[in-house]
Image (cartoon, rainbow, N blue to C red):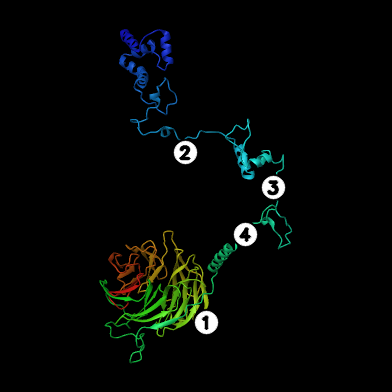
Amino acid sequence: MSAAIAALAASYGSGSGSESDSDSEGGRCPLPAADSLMHLTKSPSAKPSLAVAVDAAPEVAVKEDLETGVHLDPAVKEVQYNPTYETMFAPEFGPENPFRTQQMAAPRNMLSGYAEPAHINDFMFEQQRRTFATYGYALDPSLDNQVTTKYIGSVEEAEKNQGLTVFETGQKKIEKRKKFKENDASNIDGFLGPWAKYVDEKDVAKPSEEEQKELDEITAKRQKKGKLEDEKPGEEKTILHVKEMYDYQGRSYLHIPQDVGVNLRSSVPPEKCYLPKKQIHVWSGHTKGVSAVRLFPLSGHLLLSCSMDCKIKLWEVYGDRRCLRTFIGHSKAVRDICFNTAGTQFLSAAYDRYLKLWDTETGQCISRFTNRKVPYCVKFNPDEDKQNLFVAGMSDKKIVQWDIRSGEIVQEYDRHLGAVNTIVFVDENRRFVSTSDDKSLRVWEWDIPVDFKYIAEPSMHSMPAVTLSPNGKWLACQSMDNQILIFGAQNRFRLNKKKIFKGHMVAGYACQVDFSPDMSYVISGDGNGKLNIWDWKTTKLYSRFKAHDKVCIGAVWHPHETSKVITCGWDGLIKLWD
């Protein structure tokens, strides 16, 4: 055993006491004492090699660092030997980067480099900051101000005030700028209060004559924009496009034809409907996009269309499918149209802020209505005994009810928080449903200006197009999250979660929804100009085809036909599909 210890001592390198001291000072581990080694090796189970491994490891590591130039761990706080330059500046991981610059190698704690931590008294900093903000000068922070006093900013002001700070002004009063005083509040015209000018304030430079002219023009334009001037309604005129207004029996185009192969007078819908397959006719005549199409009530033998070219046109659905009459009278795009129950008159709503009542047969404008707001939708009350009343959803969040006979507003439904988009009569015309940009759906009793039902969910989107189903039980709402939602139209107005129609891209467009007369299909246009047809029972998308080059904004299924659908789009065309 003593031989092993001797050999171990020899391997550490024995020498004089002074040498071992100098070694330990140089960073090498001190020679392990013989007693400790003896103590480790006395136990019968322990091996001499174990003792060597435990005590010799740090020395070996140190030697490796010195000889091979292995890097220092940057996290280490204390070094027990003198590392070489190469060891200290060796790369942390991997080989050295040949493109690394001195700037890159420098430590950074912010974007522009390394900011050394410095302490400045909060009070001193605030004092200098406020002094600079108030008087325009402060002590130069780059100099030791005890030796020499230099200022930055307004040096003249600093010398004049003898370098006083805002907190030292008590020693030498710095005069503040004086204002004109007129504190007598009873002098209404002369009272200046806090708006008074400074005494030493010079007159503001006035614009030259040319500049003044320009300014006057700009302010005049702004005032014109701001004021809702009494815009004169556009002159109304009408153009008849057919030779004879009446046939040999004295019947006008309002007469329902009986030779079209379908009983248009019947109130019974077709038994079974089929998917439209092909385009059979195009009505062209509008020079800009078509906003809406409406079929003649009950029979559907005439088609009314309104457009962004400010015109309204009446077309034949059967026979030669001619354009019968054009109604001209709006100065801006026409947004919505609505027939009365008999179809003898219709209302038009346009962006020129006017609602106009027209005679369908003669083309005469009977009357005009405005409350200086843009009407977004308009609806006649469908009741026979209320044909003199109509409601319009306005841009100022109100639903306004007019009486045609007096031309006056008789009721205002003012509960919505955004522009009103649609109005639909439900429950045998006793109630109507409105939707708005406030993403809500409200149900109103006729002539009662407080909504009795308010539907709004955080997940709901705006629904700018709503249609009542032929059986009067459901409301189809075009939601702006690319789906059609179905609400019950009787009493509860609950969302039918089983019937949600998806698969079309409609966000941003108020594309009209419609049902087939037998309630087996739901149709809608979309933002890509396609016509989408879903199955009502399964909500599957059955058919989709390109109908228009631009947005397909309107789609109507003919109430007496099994597969005839009329679409209109922003390409200015109206198409008939079968």
Query: In the rendering, at what x and y percent does residue 13 appear?
Result: 35, 11
Viewer-nearest of discs 1 and 4:
4
Mark 1 vs mark 4, CA separation in Å: 54 Å
Q: Would you name the residue on which mark 2 appears? A: 112
The disc, 1 or 3, on the residue closer to the chain's N-terminal end is 3
Q: Would you name the residue on which mark 3 appears? A: 176
The structure residue drawn at horizontal position 31% and vertical position 85%, both measured from the top left corner, is: 257
Q: What residue type is labelled 1?
A: Ser
Q: Would you name the residue on which mark 4 appears? A: 206
Q: What residue type is labelled 3?
A: Lys
Density class for disc 2 (Cα within 10 Å; few <14, some 14-19, many ≥20) is few
Relative to 355, say whether 152 is above or below: above
Relative to 333, say whether 142 is above or below: above
Q: Which amino acid does label 2 sit on?
A: Ser
The disc, 4 or 2, on the residue closer to the chain's N-terminal end is 2
Residue 265: which disc?
A: none
Mark 3 vs mark 2, CA separation in Å: 41 Å
Viewer-nearest of discs 3 and 4:
4
Mark 4 vs mark 2, CA separation in Å: 46 Å
The disc, 2 or 1, on the residue closer to the chain's N-terminal end is 2
Density class for disc 3 (Cα within 10 Å; few <14, some 14-19, many ≥20) is few
Q: Quadrant of residue 436?
A: bottom left
Q: Would you name the residue on which mark 1 appears? A: 406
Query: In the rendering, at what x and y percent does residue 442 appear?
Result: 45, 68
The structure residue drawn at horizontal position 28% and vertical position 85%, both measured from the top left corner, is: 259
